[in-house]
Amino acid sequence: MSAGGVPSIPNPLMEGAPVAFRDGPFENLKVPLAWTAAAVVIVAIVLSVLLLLGDRREAATADSYGPTRAAVDTVTGPVGGVLAAPVRWAGAASDFVGGYFFAVSENRRLRRELAELQPWRDQAIALKNVNARYEAMLGIRTEPPVAMITARSISESRGPFVNARLLDVGSGKGVRVGNPVINEHGLVGRVTGTSARISRLVLLTDVASRTPVLVDRTDARAILTGDGSGNPRLEFVRGNNSVQAGDRILTSGDGGGYPRGVPIGVAAKGIDGSWRVKLFSDRGAIDYVRVMLFQDFGQLADVAALSPPPLTGLAAAPAPTAEQAAAIADAGARRDAAAAQRAATANAPVTTPTPTRPAPARPAAAPTATPPRPAPTPAEPAAQPGGEG
C-alpha cells in the first residue's frame, strides 16, 4: 500500500508481474502473465494440430479417429438441425413478406418477359410443324423404290376451274413433264410444265386432269376425272357393282404415266348419283410435296434379273491363256497367207509363167494362137481332091 493508505495497483504490462483475480473466490491467486500467454499458445497449437489431422481424411485411418468422429457427428447433427431451424423460418418469413410487398413489381417484370417470349414461342411452334412435315416427307417409301425430290409449292389460280400450283424445283433437279407428285397422305397431281428452277403442278381436281385408277377391292379399272370441285369423279368404271362406298382407290399404272398402287382416296356417292373420290391429300396441307422422278416402267426393271443366263457350254469353257491366244493369232495369219498364195497361183498363167509347170505346157501358149488361122486352109482342100482321084 502507498503512504496515503491507498493500495498500489500493479502494472500488468510489466514482464513477470502477477495478475490478480479480484472478482471471485480466487482474488488472492496470482498467475504470471508469461505463463498465461504460454498456456494460450499451447492450446492454440494443440487445436491447430487437431484441425490439421481432422482435415487429412485420406491419410488417416478409420481406426484412429473414426469412432470419435462418428460420435461427434451423431451428437452435433440433431443439434445443428435444431439451431438451423429458426434461421430457415426467418428466411422463409422474410421471403414471404418481401414477395407480398414487391408483388406489383414482380408482376410487371413477368409481363415484360412474357411479351418478349411470345415471338419465340410462335417461331418454335412453326418450326415444330415444319420439322414434322419434313419427317413425314422423308418417311415416304414406294414399292418398288422410285427416286424422289422434296419441293415446296404455292398456289396458282388462272380461273375458277383451274387448280394448279407452282413448285420450287425444275429440270435442273431432274424434274420432267409427267412426273407424279405426292404428299405424306397420297397422290396430289402431276407435273405439266418445267423450267430450270420452277415446275407447274396440276392437281387431281383440275378440269384437265385424267388419271387411270383401280378399285383396290375388286381390281376394277376406271378413270379419275377432275371437274374443279374438291372431289373428282370416277368415270368409265368396268364391271357391275364393282365400286362400293369406302373402297380405296389406287393408281392402276395403265399407260405408264404413274406407278401402280399409289393411294388416291376412298370412293363415295355424290349428291348427283355419280361416284366420287375423297382424296387422301386433302387430309393435310400440300405446301410441301415429293416429286417422283418416274418416266416409265423401264426404269423400275432390274436389268440384271431380266438379262438371259449365259449358255452352259460357254460358261463352262475357260478363258484362253496368253499362249493360246498367240497360237490362235498365228494360225489365223498362216491361214491368210495360204489363201493369198492360192489366189496368186490361180492368176499365174495370165501374168507370168510359173517354173513349176510341166515343159509341154510352156510352148503351148504360143502355137495355140496360129493353128486356128485360115491362111493354110486353101491348100489343104486342093490336095485332098487329087489324092482321092
Image (tube, rainbow, N blue to C red):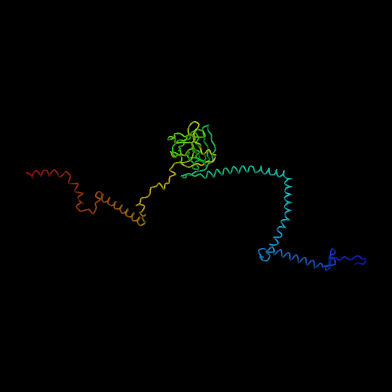
Frontmost residue, 70 versus 257: 70
Percent coordinates x, y for residue 213 in the rendering: 46, 38
* Residue that sits furthest to the left in the current view: 389
Answer with the quarter of the image where residue 44 lies.
bottom right
- State left or right for residue 195 relative to residue 82: left
Frontmost residue, 56 versus 67: 67
* Residue that sits furthest to the bottom in the current view: 16
Percent coordinates x, y for residue 332 in the rendering: 32, 53
How many numbered badges does the structure rendering display? 0
* Quadrant where the image shows the N terminus: bottom right
Percent coordinates x, y for residue 64 in the rendering: 68, 66
Residue 62 higher or lower than 139, as above or below: below
Frontmost residue, 106 versus 119: 106
* Quadrant where the image shows the C terminus: top left
- State left or right for residue 345 relative to residue 115: left
Percent coordinates x, y for residue 165 in the rendering: 52, 37
Residue 342 higher or lower than 66, as above or below: above
- State left or right for residue 125 relative to residue 110: left
Frontmost residue, 140 versus 73: 73
* Residue that sits furthest to the top in the current view: 272
